[in-house]
Amino acid sequence: MKKKLLFSLALCASVLMGATQAKAQSKLDVPPLDEELTELADEVIAQQISDPDAANKSFTKLFRKMRNNKEELVSAGKYFLSKKVYPCAKFCADGAYKLDAQYLPALMLGGEVYMTFKDYGTAGQRFDEALLVDSTLTEALELKAFVYKNVNPHVAIEALERIKRLDPNNFEADKDLGDIAYNMGEYKKAVKHYDPYYKGTPVDSLNERSLENYMNSLYATQNFVKALGVLKVIEPRYPNNLVFKRINFICNYENYDLPATEAAMSYIRDKQFADSLYLYLDYAYASKYMKEKNDTANAILYMEKAVAADSSRTSAYKDLSSMYQMGRDYDKAISAYTTYLTKLGEKAQPTDLFQLGVLNFYASQNATGDAKTAYVAAGDTVFARVSSEVPDSYLGPQWRARINNIDDKTPLDNVRAFYVEALNRIGDNEKAKSAKLESLQYLAWYALQKDQNDDALKYSEQILQIDPENVMAGQIKSFLSRFAGQQ
């Protein structure tokens, strides 16, 4: 044996998760080390740091005493494993495996030892060999699932489903299946597996991280009421869990329980956690809630925080623009929406572009001079593009007419032309009556201002067919009738 080989291996590795049953089946039991072998093992453990050479000699002496006894090798391997002396545990496991490659305790020990070295391929192989010896060995299935859970989840799923067939009440398998589904983004499946885990496991024994996954999955699948029911049970046990506070806040908002939402929002309002721990969702929902309360200033503030928390979210800039629009800060709204369109890139559709024109329209309404001219030009450019790219829609020409109608006292030829185009595109569309009335009213007013009385009367009569109580059309018709009678 080469003494450098043994102790050149790292002595610290990740501790095994408790994937095996609390009490091993008798087929995996081995006698404990006798007193003499235990003393030698303790000698190795005591010397491994202070005197590696002496430890190596002590281990060699121990190994020679038991190298032909597979039970003693497994017992020693388990002992070293429990003391986290992994290189010694590995030598014992490999020695027992060489003596009997079908000895279940040796196979299981080998799998566990190789897991500590993160050699998941060899570990999984040992568990597969154990299952060839005994296909119903639950411990091997559980550890195989643990090995492959994050390496090859489909293999882990197969092992866990075998466990469930052997033991339908193995709720730990449900937990692992839920974890795998959650990590794969399959939230409906995650809920399906977490449900029996939650119902069948004592509350004090539930895994906090898996409960977080469960809550996130219920939110993702819009099971808001169900999530709130579970939270009533588990949240008091984890008073400092940010995920549970987040889901409680969001689900109360989605359930439109505003008093409960107000109370649940305290984790954000009172800054109960470090800034770095809050997510986009926290602030985005806080913004929605403030909007619900008509608190525009805080709605904007929280949406700005949401974007700062995750600037990679394309939709965040659209929402931020909406908040700025609500606050009538159109320059910021236009800037945020422009960023949104830039991030969309080639995915941007005419319907996405349309809102940029609308924002420029609203910005132009209270602007004057060069600023107004700039807003009108920018908006008209957008609406012209929409008109061209969506020739069947009346919205492009309608909004071109609106944004170019900068003087309500002067009939404008270009505005009239846009409304005529909008009217032509509307045709007999019964769902566009209000747009049709808008177009006809401008055309009637334009004709009246231009002394085109026949057209003014024609458009007024068309308006009255749609809206018999229309005041403007009624006045024009009455005026033109009197005027005609005086001639």
Image (spheres, rainbow, N blue to C red):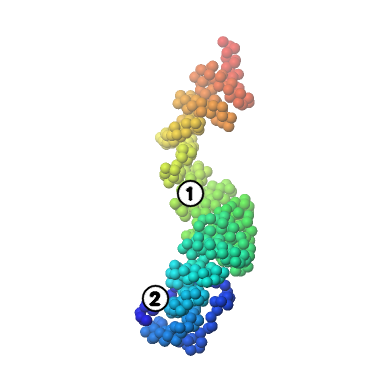
**Quadrant where the N terminus is found in the figure:** bottom left
- Residue 191 visible somewhere in the drawing: yes
Q: Position of residue 27 (x, y in %)?
A: 56, 76
Q: Looking at the image, which residue is at 60% across and 66% down?
A: 166
Along the viewing direction, whichever of 33 and 364 lies nearer the viewer: 33
Give the tally of numbered discs: 2
Along the viewing direction, whichever of 91 and 99 lies nearer the viewer: 99
Q: Position of residue 392 (x, y in %)?
A: 49, 31
Establish if 416 lies above or below 81. above
Q: CA distance from mark 1 to mark 2?
A: 49 Å
Q: Residue under label 2, please give it.
A: 9
Q: Residue under label 1, please give it.
A: 316
Q: Amino acid at mark 1?
A: Ala
As helix, strand or loop, the secondary structure at mark 1 comes to helix
Among the 4 quarters of the image, the one containing residue 87:
bottom left
Along the viewing direction, whichever of 133 and 106 lies nearer the viewer: 133
Which numbered disc, 1 or 2, marks the residue closer to the eye?
2
Q: Looking at the image, which residue is at 53% across and 83% down?
A: 32
- Residue 356 visible somewhere in the drawing: no
**Quadrant where the C terminus is found in the figure:** top right
